[in-house]
Every structure is written in structure tokens, then in C-alpha cells.
Amino acid sequence: EKGEPFQLLVDYARYHDVNIFGLRSMFEYDVLEGYGVKPADALEHLLRGGVRPIIASSEQFREIRKVLIAYGGSVRAAECMRQFLRMQLWPNVTLRLIDCSTKDSVATRDLTDAVAYCRAFGYEAERTHRPGKPEREILAEAEEWDADMIVLGSSTKGVLRTKVFGSTAL
């Protein structure tokens, strides 16, 4: 294909439910040659173009058995969880929902509702509340629980990376 790579990727993504982009291959096979784009910038361009969901995979194959869903009650987090549940790409996984809000009562309410929502899609979900900085607590929980995948929402509030990804996703 000839043309601006990100626009082509956004155009193709428009009519598909799932889009898997090999960020490593974008750089190793010169898809982005001459554009001076870093992987995080590539994700930003795709998100700004409305491409969702984006599945970022590890360098090594890893069977998806345990999925940690970051859920703090926001609309974006709910949309992300809903999309993951509706797609049913991994129907036999164990789910764990994590909330990092500081108020236990808010986390309990949000997680109770989210667990019930997961059940409506045929998933039983565990829940955990780890008050603190989400970017630290989510990764710590994923490592301790040995999660194979983390599901995060993203925001498109602005052009700056922290606005596009949200501080937690970054």
C-alpha cells in the first residue's frame, strides 16, 4: 500500500471488530520508515483515529488464562470491560476486577456491580481493591496474580499522550 501509514491503518480498522497491530513489525519492516515514530506514538495515532480495541501483545506467546480488568467505575472503564465481555475472544478465562480508588465503599459498590455485569455474560469474576496509584497497583496485582492480560480503558480527551491514553493506561 502507498500512503500515510496511520491513515491507512485507521481506514482498514473502521470495518473490523478487532485489529491487531504488530508494533514491532511496523518498525522492523520499515512500515513507518521516515516517519520518526516511536511505539507509544504509534498507539497514540491509532487511538486518536478511533481504533479500538488495541491488543498489545508480549514478545513471547502466552496462553490467555487469567485476565485482570482495571475497573474504577468510570464510563471509559465500563466501555472497555463491556467490549471485552461482548467479544468473548477468551470465553474460558478467569477474570479478576481491580479497583484502585481510595474509598472502600465506592470500590465495593463499583466492583459488586461489575461482577454482576460479568456474570450476565457468563463470566464469574473475582474482585480486589488495592487503594493507591493505579499504574503501580494494577501492575503489582497482575504480577502477583500472574495475569496473562490486562484490560484497560483509554481516553481521547486531547492530543497529548497522557490525555489520549490516560495516566493509568500509560
Image (tube, grey):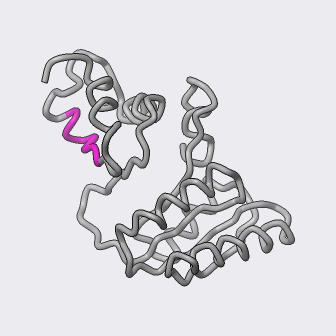
Identified at 24% across, 61% down, the residue is 60
The mark total stands at 0
Q: Quadrant of the N terminus?
A: top left
Percent coordinates x, y for residue 121 in the rendering: 51, 75
Residues rendered magenta in the picture = 20-27
Identified at 60% across, 61% down, the residue is 70
Choose top left, top right, bottom left or bottom right for residue 170.
Answer: top right
Magenta stretch contains residue 131:
no
Percent coordinates x, y for residue 136 in the rendering: 62, 57
Vertical arrangement, residue 18 with respect to residue 115, above or below: above
Q: Is residue 2 left or right of residue 84?
A: left
The kind of secondary structure the magenta stretch mainly shows is helix
Percent coordinates x, y for residue 106 in the rendering: 83, 66
Vertical arrangement, residue 66 with respect to residue 77, above or below: below
Percent coordinates x, y for residue 113 in the rendering: 71, 72
Magenta stretch contains residue 25:
yes
Instruction: Judge by depth and name the residue closer to the eye, 99 or 123.
Output: 123
Q: Is residue 56 left or right of residue 146?
A: left
